[in-house]
Amino acid sequence: MATGEGIVLLLIPLFAVELGGAVAGAGTMFALKGIGSVLSDMPTGLAIARFGEKRLMLFGLFLMFVSMLVSSFSQTLLLLGTGTFGFGVGFGVFMLTRLNFIAETTFLHQRGRGMSILGGIQRIGRFLGPIIGGVCIKFFGFQITFLIAALIAAIVFVFLLFVLPGAKKRTAKHHFPKVLALIPRILAEHKKIFLTAGVAAIALQITRVGRQLLFPLWGGQIGLDAAQIGFILGLSSAIDMSLFFLSGIVMDRFGRKWAAVPCIFILGMSLILLPFSDSFLSFLLIGLLAGFGNGMGSGIIMTMGADLSPSTERSEFLGVWRFVGDLGTVVGPIFIGLLGKLFVLGTASIATGGIGLFGAGIMLFFVRETMIKYELNSNSQNERENPV
């Protein structure tokens, strides 16, 4: 499914421009994907405890399949936006469900590696996706490429339907609160976490979505075609995915911040340098730098969220945690699109990189090391949960 997502992430900005949306239109499309993911986080966090992971994974895959079919027949930005929003909802359900599954089934001292492998799976798909998508766009066009991504979702659906064991439903001891009441309660109970680690997570998500949006647009602006852009983004993702297990080892042996701070800082610097590229080679080098930075933080947001989540209310907390982090996927594209419309694309890239540097500073100076919680609670019930 990560391969299908990699194809879609290349398709969205390029197809939005093809339909006449320019930078602002491409930013809006990415924002709609983020909005869909944000709106799915809290309901998914509550639904996991009631229905189990397998049903929700299948539901998320079905939504992505239908959304890509809608996008493939889009002739206007409105219809493309509808498909993109639906894809965001489905992908949000799929991601949070997998995050909760890994958090429930790994030992605490192995969680960094477990989450980094989960992040590495995403990166492998994002390595293959842009390369496949770029070639397919060049030879078959946007519509067929969307259908290929939809076919991937259908194959994954069938695979999980027969292979993934039905997950145990986890019913909370208390009555399920309403979604709108749950958010402020968890934010209030863990306000220090969200004002420090949460802000850093938002900054990281803004820079990540900035990489996904700005690199294809900048490549097109300097005259590269879809196949060249897809090739470079694929190589960037190759660097990204090659570091995922190293990132997990660093997180488990030295601490989460040793992975988080370099990740946000290097990714932010790559976006600041992007406007200075004017050729295939310079664009390639900066793309590889971005891949290296992002690879250093493989699974970092998921790991810290799992670290900080209470064992009695894990899926609900993770729903709010992803909700806060996913705000970056909404704010980022709108921010980039607005700056791109008011100024130039290069200004949007530099400003987005600056947000990354700000997030690195927050993570370095204000966020405590979350592995400390493990050391203080090594005899907790979580430590005895089923390991992978």
Image (spheres, rainbow, N blue to C red):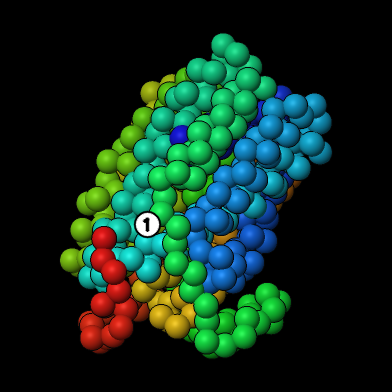
Q: Is residue 50 left or right of residue 255?
A: right
Q: Is residue 3 visible?
A: yes
Q: Is residue 181 left or right of residue 124?
A: right
Residue at x-position 23% and y-position 86% = 379
Where's residue 59, x and y in %?
60, 51
Where's residue 269, x and y in %?
42, 48
Where's residue 84, x and y in %?
68, 42
Residue at x-position 23% and y-position 83% = 378
Residue at x-position 81% and y-position 31% = 76
The quarter in which the C terminus is drawn is: bottom left
Query: Dot 1 surroundings within 10 Å: few (below 14), some, or many (20 or more)?
Result: many
Per the image, the residue denoted by label 1 is 299
Foreground pick, 16 / 157: 157
Foreground pick, 180 / 216: 180
Q: Quadrant of residue 223?
A: top right
Foreground pick, 94 / 336: 94
Question: Above or below — where is 289 with respect to 219?
Answer: below
- Quick one: SS at disc 1? loop
Residue at x-position 59% and y-position 32% = 150
Q: Amino acid at mark 1?
A: Gly
Outermost residue to the left: 253
Where's residue 107, x and y in %?
26, 70
Q: Quadrant of residue 154?
A: top right
Foreground pick, 51 / 364: 51
Q: How many marks?
A: 1
